[in-house]
Amino acid sequence: MAQNSTLFTAISLLVFSIFSHCQALTLEALCESTPHPPVCKSVLPVGPPGSVSGFASIVIIKSLEASKHLLASFDQHHPTTGPLDDCQLLAGLTVDQLTRVNVIKETVLGTSEVNDLLTLLSAAITNYETCLGSFHDATGESSENFVKDHHDILTRVSDGIKLISVSLALSKEAWPIASDASVTKPPPRILTEDEKKSSSPEVSYVKVTKPVSGRGFIARDITFRNTAGPHNRQAVALRVDSDQSAFFRCSMEGYQDTLYAHSLRQFYRECEIYGTIDFIFGNGAAVLQNCKIYTRVPLQLQKVTITAQGRKSPNQNTGFVIMNSYVLATQPTYLGRPWKLYSRTVYMNTYMSQLVQPRGWLEWFGNFALDTLWYGEYNNIGPGWRASGRVKWPGYHIMDKRTAMSFTVGSFIDGRRWLPATGVTFTAGLAN
């Protein structure tokens, strides 16, 4: 009897040892699949086996705690204007968004709930990236001193980006959804120092003609106009970070950076957008349907580019979709250029006038993001659509119908669920 007991104990210890080792390897591999493996390993407990969803929940809670600490730290700095103003506002939004994520993850997660969770995590990352951009875009000796004086905030923001990025990666692993299946995801990349230094200028988050936040904003028959003119460079007419927002028969008028689709899910129907450079930009998940896009005369030596989408992580469910629309170019025009490393923009069933350039798309600088961006076209028409002349970048795609379906209102922004309540007309699929 004692011999059997000893044998049972030995077998149990062997099984526990093997199981624990396999779990350690699994946890190691899981963290290696995230953008920041050291951060992942530092916050996940070494102990009994757990599910991927359990690990995701742990990091989400850690992200929320860190964001609350960041928001509280502004009390010591007394923000007044500029980058601190931006960051305090964005930190508050992030705490709200992560609080919602923390509630959602405790529910039964269907496709819609997972979409909500991934959207909020994507927006939280964008908030902090925007905060960092406000600091890093500062120039001059006084600005350098300002950055040094607030090093603690910058460190907390950088750490927050890493934590939330790990949360997003683990959440996608824990709760996969079918809409991602047809779009090949590029592997994560680490920016070189040259690419970091050459990143694009940021836009003040606060200084816009009309900011729209909250949830479920609806606008009809309204003109949003920035009258600064082309000589004043960046001049935002409308900034949107309202989830499930809808704009119907609206006009956005400006020159550079007209429409700042900053974050979250947005829908534009029968709208008119006017501009010169990067005049639809940001990192929201935005669909423009049955819209008219007009290009204006830029300053000398400037090139007209319609979009500058700012996706910084391949795990973010963000991007721009322009479908069933008209690109009416009065100047030589490019469809877009990659503002950030994983920029994502598609045009579908859209008429393109003569002055849309044969190559279609423009580099930001050199080869930056050409192998990690995701640009696509499907079933476009007009003299500005020439498949043979388009760029040959690794990240450019002439899409088939199956891939195009991933970018419809129904799939990309889960529009069937929330757009009917807005009263705004929409097409859920590919048809006009």
Image (spheres, rainbow, N blue to C red):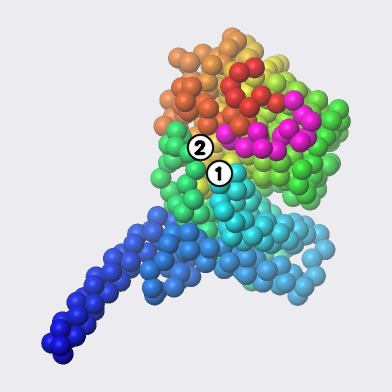
Residue for point 80% across, 45% down: 211
The image shows residue 90 at horizontal and vertical percentages of 71, 57
Would residue 3 be visible to someone looking at this image? yes
Residue 410 colored magenta?
A: no
Q: Is residue 372 left or right of residue 156?
A: left
Magenta segment's dominant SS is helix
Residue 415 colored magenta?
A: yes
Q: Residue 111 has which mark?
A: 1
Front residue (pair 152, 115): 115
Q: Which residue is mark 2?
A: 179
Q: Is residue 310 left or right of residue 16?
A: right
**Secondary element type, mark 1:** helix
Front residue (pair 126, 277): 126
Residue for point 52% across, 51% down: 196
Q: Quadrant of residue 310?
A: top right
The image shows residue 311 at horizontal and vertical percentages of 57, 43
Mark 2 vs mark 1: give the one in front: 1
Q: Amino acid at mark 1?
A: Thr
**Secondary element type, mark 2:** helix
Residue for point 46% across, 35% down: 183
The image shows residue 358 at horizontal and vertical percentages of 53, 16
Q: Residue 158 has which mark?
A: none
Q: Is residue 82 left or right of residue 4?
A: right
